[in-house]
Amino acid sequence: MSLPVPPTYLGPRDEPPAAEWVDEVDPEPLPELLPKGTRVGIILAMVSLILLTRFGLNTGSYGLNFAVPVIYVMIFAGLAKDRFNLDLPGLILYTMFIGVGALSLLANLNLGHDRDGSFASLILLAVLYLPFVFLLRPFAVSREAWMWAMRMFSNLALFVAVVGVIQFCLQFVWKPAWLFDFSPLIPKVISADVLANSSIYTGSAYKANGFFLREPSAFSFLMAFSLICEMALFKRWVRMGTFAAGLMLSYSGTGLLALAFGLMFPFGFKTAVRIGIIVTVGLILLLLFGDALNLTFTLSRINEFKSESSSGYIRYVAPMRLINEMIDSSAWTAFVGHGPGTIFHAGRSYEFHDPTWAKLLYEYGLLGFAACLGLMFYAMSRSHAPVQIRATLFFCWLVQGGHLLTPENVLLIYVLLSMWPPPGSELRRRFHGSTMPMTTMQFEEKGPYG
């Protein structure tokens, strides 16, 4: 009986079809997420916005933070090298906002209602918000690159937190004149020259201001925001404890309000549990260290909202009173405002501050208010950041101070949130009729920008 004969090999036509190649898995993080020039620009901008707030390009009447020229150089160089894109919806919203500002200035100057409008204020507004029209071109690892930027921010914030804690403790053994305010030592030509209350006494000690920041309230917000970022992204307990210590030693309600607001997001059961844990820990700390550290000083400031001469009333209550009294001074002021730079020309019997929302409504009216919020909502919505990070920055910018023309707040939003390509916009390629992400091998061959 003959054995079965194996089939004769007739050549390549008889081979089974080769398996189709699919996207390879990236086994480890890419060594280079961004071009060197962009990375340097981001780091220099962060250093300027966090460590160099007392420094600036002094024009005689205004000290412009060094982050402004740094960011413009980064954007223009990026446009030349095809690393940045012009964002059309952002451009439309920006043009509407600045257009309302120009209309407000012209209307008030020519119709004679308020001739104190400032062309320089409008120019500064245009300069600070123009970067929001530009964002990085989409690339394959934009999420990883953004996380790198947030780590750089956290490192700088940690450095300021440690310096702030040391500053607070050092005053009990050595308190030179420059420990809480070294601005008199800065040459005039590079001084931001902003009136600030750097040295505030609590009754037993001076509030920590992080040494580099102008006021304890700014240090307080930086600590609260850094704590929110750490909780949302990294969850490193030592850092969270350090940020909490800095927040406590600032004795400022600004950071506590920002923290309370940020902790409400995202809404849900876990958020309620998290808030409950933090409140419980805060009460325990108050019971254990309240007397030693005079923590009741911060809590007692809740009563400030009832007194016209208090900081709380001036910051949060008086602006509402001003808008209620002045928004409809004439037929057009409700719509286009009294003109750029005019809010402090409103003569009132009470003192008031200029939080962003009040300055927008008073100087640019309902139309300017809507256009500006539309621009900022849009610019922040395209971010990789979790909602609590976006909400905390937006809350501070809108409510917690006169930040409409403050580079340290406006441009921090741009660098941390709005300059990055939106999630889901990474480069893709066509393969066998389907869209697939760019692989590590392709990224390394093409680079982050193709």
Image (tube, rainbow, N blue to C red):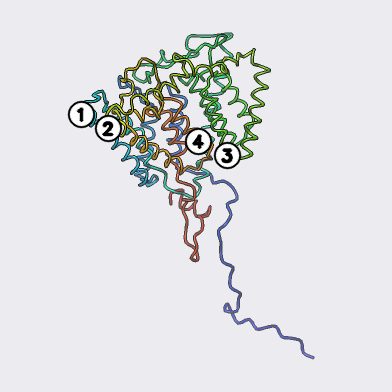
Q: Nearer the viewer, residue 212 or 288?
A: 288
Pointer 1 with pointer 3, Cβ within 8 A: no
Please give the residue where the numbered disc 4 appears in the rendered image: 391
Amino acid type at circle 2 is Trp
Where residue 283 sits, quadrant-wise, is top right
Compute the Cα span from label 1 to label 3. 48 Å
Expressed as whole percent of the image width and height from the top left, the position of residue 209 reads 51, 18
Q: Is residue 320 left or right of residue 100?
A: right
Compute the Cα span from label 1 to label 4. 39 Å
Pointer 3 with pointer 2, Cβ within 8 A: no
| Crowd band around label 1 with a 10 angstrom C-alpha radius: few (<14), some (14–19), many (20+) | few
Please give the residue where the numbered disc 3 appears in the rendered image: 267
Please give the residue where the numbered disc 2 appears in the rendered image: 332
| Crowd band around label 3 with a 10 angstrom C-alpha radius: few (<14), some (14–19), many (20+) | few
Pointer 2 with pointer 1, Cβ within 8 A: yes
Compute the Cα span from label 4 to label 2. 32 Å
Expressed as whole percent of the image width and height from the top left, the position of residue 120 reads 28, 27
Quarter the N terminus occupies: bottom right
Element carrying mark 2: loop
